Amino acid sequence: MFKSASFSLLIKTLLVCLPLSCVLALGPAQALADGAANAFNPYTGKAMPSSRKVKGEDSKILEALGGTQRSIATDAAYRPHWKEEAYPVLKGTMDARHEVLLVLDMADPAARPLWKTVRAAMDRLPAAQARLVLFARSAELYATDLTGLAIWACRERPGQAISYLSWALQRWDDIKAAQRRKGTVRPFNNEYDAVLSRKDYPLAFVAMNSCFKPKVPEKDQSRLATYIYDAGNINLYQATEVCRYYGLETPSGLIVDGKVVDSATSVEALKALLK
């Protein structure tokens, strides 16, 4: 598979090198104090928090040199669908009453019960009640591609992204279990780590052929593979920013209207928060 190497290198370098002491650029969000919710919603037109923002003397030097503050908005603005990549809505509407941010790491066992709880709660709510937004972390890097495919599905296969994510998590676990039985388990850091044999198709390509209606035409699959890798990297970067901003310390977690929710929250408790 061909990748956009320079773009992915930029994103991953920024993830590694960001100084933790940088100040976050806070902006007020609609109807909520302190910008708690909607802080990472690019559709508000307001600056999103960024741990790359410089201040003080550094800011003066940057201005004197004619430079500008870095942000995901400026770095990714050349991409026609960058807002969807930075803030992919799995379900719900932009004017929904509540914002539910799901931080999901496919390599995290705790992501499975969390996903089931969130999906069950969202299935029982009208679209105008709450929107579910995906921010995916990737302790095992092939999750980046699988996230990008969910982002693509939000736009190109409306209503199918949630069922695809359930499939991806289950398929991930099934392959891990089969590898353990064979004594060949390994981190899923590239597409051929997440297979049982070199004759198997990578997970993303299996999904393109089986998870969506209509399925992705074969002539479009290589181009889509490049897109989902880049889109997944943008979302991965934003997931890192979201976790820093809200102080989420677990690999996966839930943030409702700007507040971190206990990962053990039940379906009914989550529904009560979203009334």
Image (spheres, helix red, strand yellow):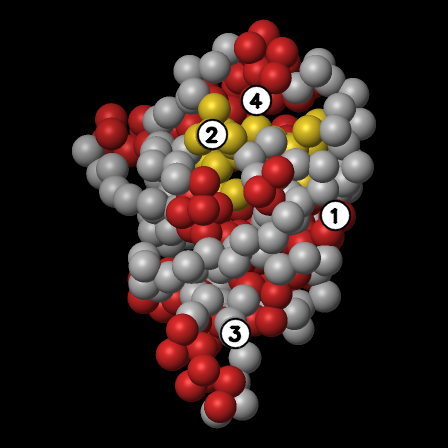
Image location of residue 112, percent across then percent down? 44, 24
Task: Name the amino acid type tagged 3.
Answer: Gln
Residue beneath disc 1: 155
Residue 88 visible within the image: no
Q: To which quarter of the image does residue 158 belong? A: top right
Q: Nearer the viewer, residue 49 or 3?
A: 49
- Ranked by sequence position, the earlier of labels 4 and 2 is 4
Dot 2 surroundings within 10 Å: few (below 14), some, or many (20 or more)? some
Residue beneath disc 3: 69
* For residue 71, side relative to residue 138 (left or right): right
Residue beneath disc 4: 118
Q: Nearer the viewer, residue 146 or 197?
A: 146
Image location of residue 273, percent across then percent down? 61, 17
Task: Name the amino acid type tagged 2.
Answer: Val
From the image, state whether disc 4 or disc 2 is nearer to you: 2
Residue at the far top in the pictured view = 268
CB contact under 8 Å: marks 4 and 2: no
In the rendered view, would you say 92 is above or below 243? above
Dot 3 surroundings within 10 Å: few (below 14), some, or many (20 or more)? few
Disc 1 secondary structure class: helix
Report the residue at 64% width, 48% height from top.
28
- Ranked by sequence position, the earlier of labels 1 and 4 is 4
Residue beneath disc 2: 260
Report the residue at 22% width, 38% height from top.
184
Residue at the far front in the pictured view = 56
Task: Name the amino acid type tagged 4.
Answer: Val
Dot 1 surroundings within 10 Å: few (below 14), some, or many (20 or more)? some
From the image, state whether disc 3 or disc 1 is nearer to you: 3
From the image, state whether disc 1 or disc 4 is nearer to you: 4
